[in-house]
Image (cartoon, coloured by chain):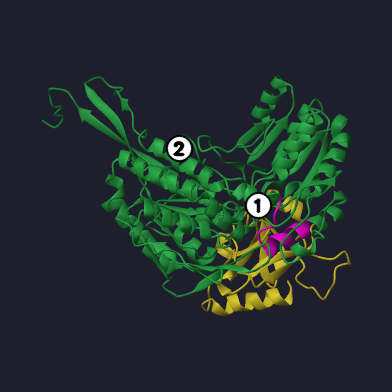
Amino acid sequence: MTPRARRLLARVRAAAADGGEPFAFIISGGCCGGTNPVLCHRANIIDGFDVQLGEADGIAVYAHPDHARYLVTDRFVIDALDDVRSDTFSLEIAHGGRFVLRELPDSPRNSATPAVLSRTP
Amino acid sequence: MAGTAQPIGAENGVRRYQLFINGKFTDSRSGKTFESISPHDRSVVAVVAEGDKTDIDAAVSAARGAYEGVWSTTPPGERAKLLLKIADLLEANSAELGRLETLDMGMPMVMSSAMGAVSADVFRYWAGMATKIHGLTGEPMRPGDYLGYTLREPLGVVGGITPWNGPLIMAAWKTAPALACGNTVVLKPAEHTPMTSLELARLTAEAGLPEGVLNVVPGFGPTAGAALASHPGVDKIAFTGEYVTGRLIVQMSASNLKTVTLELGGKSPHIIFDDVDLEAAVATALFGLYMNSGQICSAGTRILVQEGLYDRFVERFVERSQQVKVGDPMDFATRMGPLVSEEQLGKVQRYVEIGKKEGARLRCGGGQPKDPTLARGFYHEPTVFTEVDNKMQIAQEEIFGPVASVLRFHDEDDAVRIGNDVIYGLAAGVQTKDLKRAHRLAKRLQAGTVWINTWHMIEPNSPFGGYKLSGYGRENGVAMVEHLTRLKQVWVDLNDFTMDLFA
């Protein structure tokens, strides 16, 4: 997760009520709002169905199992844009930004980018 | 009756739009606004009121009032007349609606200028349908003289949530059928492209649609969209968009068990056999892919070419792709305008990088056009990857941009296997001169629409929707009446005696 994305996430967390519901990301696909990380609540995850791809800043990242097959080899970071216009229901949009995926450069995994997603065993 | 809608003004070329609730244009309760930006040069084209939960509450309340007070008892013939009036106004305003659509999302004028007339056709089709919605009569299975009949009733308040890729036509799909069936509507247009939905609202008021029958509340997904999807006063949601928001809507619908129809993404296979005329095949493939800069859910983005034709097809397809006129969408000669947003451009660029890393061969495009007059816009060149394997991400994920993945197949079984090996199932297409083979494939392909020797045939009278992660339910056509009405069974005892079991 990029510093910009972390700052956006911090705003979302600050606005959440104390002891609020935990969050999760689902990688979406298709149509206008597709291929974006959608921030939702952990309760929106379907246990035993959704596949966890990894973790970003303490938030588990999931995908539909058929979609996950193609994502496990993809190495991406979660970045943020200031433009809040989106077709998704992703929760951060109400806090002045939006999460997007960015492809990592070809360089080997960089330890300075700790929230790189990788497949969980 | 409506009639209080104010003409919408423009200052310094920047238009101002308010929410449309209960027949009136009004600011959002919060007073917040957001900007709509031209994808051609990033200039602000409109400042739009930003609705949230409070405004959705007001719109749903207006829609409920109009449903119970007026619309559910308006005779179908009267509903039909109003829909026809709206259609006439859409057609009469087609040039201006097209211009606004192009300003808002970059759709080339050659396409957007037809959208008013195309949307008018949707309203006319449903105006006709309004007077043909009825139940059936039936006989009981048991002995005795009974009359049974069904009443086909409207659902009540229908919420429509539209995407940005075809704002006016999507607004027409979400409103005309619902209104024809006797429902009232709250429409939440896409954030990138609210203008023409609000113009539609203005035209419905001009046509005399009663206050509250159609309400349009632009706003953002997690605030306005989620408020509509989870609202206990909404009876049905029709959504076009991406997978996760689709399933969040399904989860939100659980509260009051509202019904949902979803039209989500696609990664449609365009299967081209070696018996085709090469020029015609290439022309259809270009049309299937590059319309609206590839920003159509049913675009033919996986081009499967039979091995005997593959090299010749690729050579010609790449040549023609390089000749596609990319430019200012206001120019009628332009065939491909910009992508809708910086984000969408970023997504396409990311997939181009992924395609290169995966080992596909980039044959043309892959970047932004060199033309300096397009430098500020979200333009991307027509891009062709060949030697694509169906397991690659560029073959599996919807890029939603002008990027072709060209794959090779051996025979009919191979084409079906590759064609169906994808998480989506919105559309598929076959080009061949072999009639029997074409119809065999139409049966075997897992897609809501199959095109044979054509593409983008989507008509108001034919059902459109998906298999698999492309969603469920159908829009357009008679089948949609099922999604916008419910049945009530009535039994009448015609016997001259009363069965008195408890005597």
Q: Check if residue B349 falls in the magenta segment.
A: yes
SS for dot 1: loop
**Chain letter matching colour yellow:** A
Task: Reply above or below: B109 against B489.
Answer: below
Amino acid under label 2?
Tyr
Which quarter of the figure has residue A93? bottom right
User: Which is nearer the N-term, disc 2 or disc 1?
Assistant: 1
Distance from the alpha carbon under mark 2 to that under mark 1:
26 Å
Observer able to see residue B70: yes
Left or right of B392 in this view: B248 = left
Q: Toward which corner of the image does residue B101 lie, by quadrant?
A: bottom right
Q: Residue at 66% x, 67% y: name it.
A: B42
Residue A105 vs residue B247, the one in the foreground: A105
Which segment did they paint magenta?
A: B336-351
Is the residue B460 above or below the residue B7 in the image?
Answer: above
Q: Which residue is rendered at x = 52% and y = 42% of the image? A: B473
Q: Amino acid at mark 1?
A: Pro
Which element carries disc 2, helix, strand or loop?
helix
Query: Residue at the location (74% across, 21% down)?
Result: B434
Task: Give the image location of residue A108, x and y in percent.
Answer: 88, 67
Percent across and percent down for residue A38 are 62, 62
Residue holding disc 2: B125
Chain (green): B
Instruction: Report if residue A12 lies within the magenta region.
Output: no
Q: Quadrant of the C terminus of chain B?
A: top left
Quadrant location of the N terminus of chain B?
bottom left
Quick one: label 1, few (<14), some, or many (20+) residues within 10 Å? many
Callout 2 crowding tier (Cα within 10 Å): few <14, some 14–19, many ≥20: many
For disc 1, the marked residue is: B108
